[in-house]
Image (tube, rainbow, N blue to C red):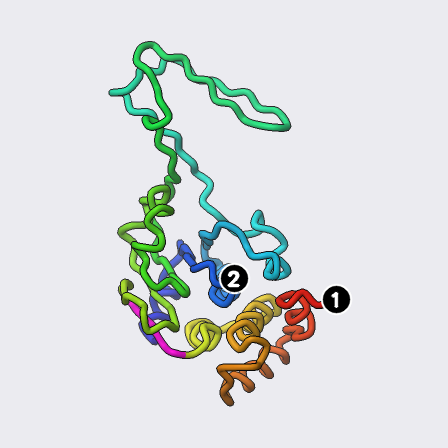
Amino acid sequence: MTEAKQIITDSKNVYLITSQEPEALACTLALFYTLKELGKNVNLLTEKLPDRLNFLAPSLDFISYPKNFVISVPNSVAQISQIYYEKNNYALKLHLTLEKGDIKKDNVAFYFQEKQPDLIICIGVKDYYKELSEKLNSFAFLMNSPILNIDNSKDNKNFGKINIIEEKSLAEIILEVSENSGKEYSKCLLTSLVIYTDNFKKNLTANIFKLTSDLMNNEADLKEIVNNVYKLP
């Protein structure tokens, strides 16, 4: 845990990768908020939030995501002499004038190109390479960065440079790794606890009740969370 805290402190450019499980997503958003407050450049790779977690972030536009998207055509396939674009309210079209050759869909590569991050933090991901292989085709620049692997599953493959695998709630682990008393951070962690315990019906421990009390004292609204997670009127 000390090593995990130190590598987070030392890193300026951080990528967060999460499973799509709601417990992990809520914890990842908590970590996103606290790293932002610490002045880190933080990017979160996720396709979308489940409807019941939309209240934790204004929109996906709020969440930092890689911006440098590359479309690549090999010179061996076609020689392009001119490029221009047109943009309207409905679409952006790129026009390529070919000097020679022929372009097919399979010849064109699409990927993000960013500065290699100082650290990747995976939350709730059991097998980094298996679960994210398709996504990593577009994010190859992540491949050689150190990984902090946080999970609560005994099936985790321990793929990280640092592996924190404990059989308890992800919220409890995140709270040990990061310290923040902000309202959004607390709301995200308490949401994760509500999901982990199925609204306090299972997986209950004295520490979970204590953590719940602490988070509520830090302005996390339990009623708001339960109403959103379970879509109560």
Q: Reading the chain from its start, which is encountered first: label 2 or label 1?
A: 2
Query: Which of 172/218 is in front?
Result: 172
Q: Is residue 87 above or below residue 24?
A: above
- Residue at x 32% of width, y 58% of height: 128
Residue 38 makes an appearance in the image: no
Extreme residue in the left direction: 76
- Residue at x 40% of width, y 54% of height: 13
Residue 87 found in image quarter: top right
Q: Label 1, on which residue?
A: 233
Q: Is residue 43 left or right of residue 88?
A: left
Q: Is residue 215 above or below residue 44?
A: below
- Of tags 2 and 1, the one toward the viewer is 1
Amino acid type at mark 1:
Pro
Q: Which residues are magenta?
A: 162-167
Which dot marks residue 29? 2
Q: Is residue 132 above or below residue 105?
A: below
